[in-house]
Structure formats: C-alpha cells, structure tokens
Image (cartoon, helix red, strand yellow):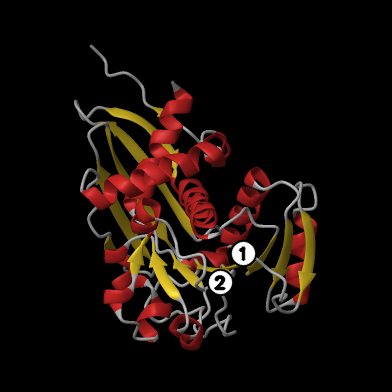
C-alpha cells in the first residue's frame, strides 16, 4: 500500500495555522511541560557549511507529537538578494512516529518567538500594556508588530532604530494594522514595555531599571551579542524562557556576568506569579519545545 502523502505548508499557509491567541496558549502549556520534563528538547546541534552559514538541528518530543526543526542560516544570501534563513519543521505522531505535516521553518520561528514575547507581556505586566516600544525594524520586529496587533488592537507602538529612514519605512509598511504607530529616535519615557529586536554587539538599551517597565530582550542570541546594558540588568529581576539555552546564547546576560543562581525561568513565573513591584527583564533565546507548541497549534487547526 502506498504511503499517504504528507501535507506541506508554505509560509503564508503556516502563518494562517498559527493564530497568536491559540499559539500563546499552546506555549504556556509547553513551557510548564518543558520545565517538568514532559517535553524533551536537547540543545540544538550546529553544523557549519563549508562555504559559510550553518545548519541547525532542533528536535523535541512529547507524549502526543514529536518535531524536528531543520533550518539553514546563510548570511551570504544577502549578497544574492535571498532570505538568510531557509528550513522546515516536521511534525510526527507521538505514538506511531508517522509523519503528520511539514511547516515553513522561518515562519514557525518568527511567530513562536513573537508569541513567547506576548506570553511575557501577559505574565510580567500587572495589566495589559497601553504603550510599547520596539527597538529594531527587521524580520523579528515585523513578527512582533503583527502579534501586538492581533492581541492588543489599539495599542500605541513606537518604533525605534538606528536609521530614521528604516524606522519610517517600517511604520509605513504596517500602517494597515489596528495600532497607533509612531517613529522615534529614542525610547519614550511613558512606556509599559520595551522589546529589543536587533543583532547589535553593543547594548541598545542602557537606561536605569524601573518598576512597572518590562524589558524583553529578543535579538541577542549569541555570546558576542548584547542589547541590554549591564547596569539595567543589575537593577532588575531577570527571567529567561529557557534556562539551559540562556547560559550559552543570552549574550546580554553572559557579558554582564549575571549571577545565574538569581535568574528565574518563565515557567516559575507562570506557576508562582511575577514580582510586579520590581523592574523585570525577560530574556528569550528560544528552544525546540516552543516549535513543538507551534506544531500542536497547527495540527489542531488542520484537524
């Protein structure tokens, strides 16, 4: 008997299978399961390409499904006018191991990364945000502004970047979203949350920490990168999405030589609450458990 065909979804189709409300809920469940050991997600394997770039292999398994995200990051593609990231997320039945579907890898990464930030806003702010600033105007910033529009329509969003032209182009590209958008050269003072979304090697946010402001660090995913300054971190309660991965990938925290014994997990905040009376930094690095949560969300929509 011929094997059944496997559904393969392109970027637009994958995005439609991952609506942000459902994805945030799936991530909250996966976060607790990952912390308890119900989801197994080893550290990602990195294999270099001879001509530059890397192949990243990230599997994860749970009782219901398993996933394997295989993506290639090719910085040289910028010169070829091609996307720098290509890849897929394959989902498998947890009992039989049979293939279930294949999702677009970059889309899964962008949407689940933004959804983790949205889970952070929900967890670490005492009330829904009214004003948020985005530092950065790249792909991740685009995913985050879509997530904010889906979950917080009417929100006031300020875009901040190193180039005023790029910031304005970013604002113009998202004018159709149900948000109040403005461009700025610096982060406003009257803000509920700041989300850093750059690949900067030097901190882009160095202001003193203050209670009531949530700072979410997304972009620095290598030891040599840092978006949040040491002084800001020193005055904050620090939470991370993946404690194991953060020790190797959270450049902000590594360079600041934070006391890792004082760094708490998102799962801890979900279980016990967050200290709203303290400044909070939420650093995310991502892991395959979050891709598994996205696959669950997509499979529920497919069914």
- Where residue 247 appears, as percent x and y from the top left, is 29, 73
- What residue is shown at x 72% (from left), y 71% (from top)? 190
Viewer-closest of 176 and 73: 176
Relative placement, left or right, of 185 versus 266 is right
Q: How many marks?
A: 2
Q: Residues within 10 Å of mark 2 (few under 14, many from 20)?
A: many
Please tell me whether residue 207 is drawn above or below residue 73 in the rendered image: below
Which corner quadrant of the image does residue 103 belong to? top left
Viewer-closest of 68 and 129: 129
Please tell me whether residue 85 is drawn above or below residue 301 in the rendered image: below
- What residue is shown at x 26% (from left), y 75% (from top)? 261
Which is nearer the N-term, disc 1 or disc 2? 1
| Residue that numbered label 1 is attached to | 138
Viewer-closest of 224 and 6: 224
Marks 1 and 2 close (CB-CB < 8 Å): yes
The disc label shown at residue 198, or none: 2
* Residue 162 appears in the figure: yes
* Residue 48 appears in the figure: no
């Amino acid at each position: 008997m011929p094997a059944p065909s496997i559904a393969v979804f392109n970027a637009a189709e994958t995005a439609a299978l991952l609506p942000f409300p459902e994805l945030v809920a799936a991530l909250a469940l996966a976060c607790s399961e990952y912390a308890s050991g119900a989801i197994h997600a080893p550290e990602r394997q990195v294999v270099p390409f001879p001509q530059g770039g890397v192949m990243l292999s990230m599997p994860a398994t749970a009782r219901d499904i398993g996933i394997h995200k295989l993506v290639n990051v090719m910085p040289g593609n910028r010169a070829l006018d091609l996307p720098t990231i290509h890849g897929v997320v394959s989902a498998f039945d947890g009992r039989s191991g049979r293939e279930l579907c294949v999702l677009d890898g970059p889309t899964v990464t962008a949407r689940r990364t933004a959804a983790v930030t949205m889970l952070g806003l929900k967890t670490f702010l005492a009330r829904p945000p009214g004003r948020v600033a985005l530092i950065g105007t790249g792909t991740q910033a685009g995913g985050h502004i879509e997530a904010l529009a889906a979950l917080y329509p009417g929100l006031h969003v300020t875009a901040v970047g190193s180039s005023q032209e790029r910031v304005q182009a970013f604002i113009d590209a998202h004018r159709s979203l149900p948000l109040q958008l403005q461009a700025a050269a610096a982060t406003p003072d009257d803000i509920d949350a700041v989300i850093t979304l750059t690949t900067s090697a030097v901190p882009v946010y160095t202001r003193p920490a203050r209670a009531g402001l949530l700072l979410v660090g997304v972009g620095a995913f290598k030891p040599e990168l840092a978006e949040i300054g040491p002084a800001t971190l020193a005055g904050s309660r620090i939470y991370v999405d993946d404690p194991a991965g953060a020790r190797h990938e959270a450049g902000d925290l590594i360079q600041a030589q934070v006391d890792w014994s004082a760094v708490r997990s998102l799962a801890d905040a979900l279980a016990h609450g967050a200290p709203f009376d303290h400044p909070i930094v939420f650093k995310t690095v991502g892991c395959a458990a979050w891709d598994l949560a996205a696959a669950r969300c997509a499979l529920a929509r497919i069914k």
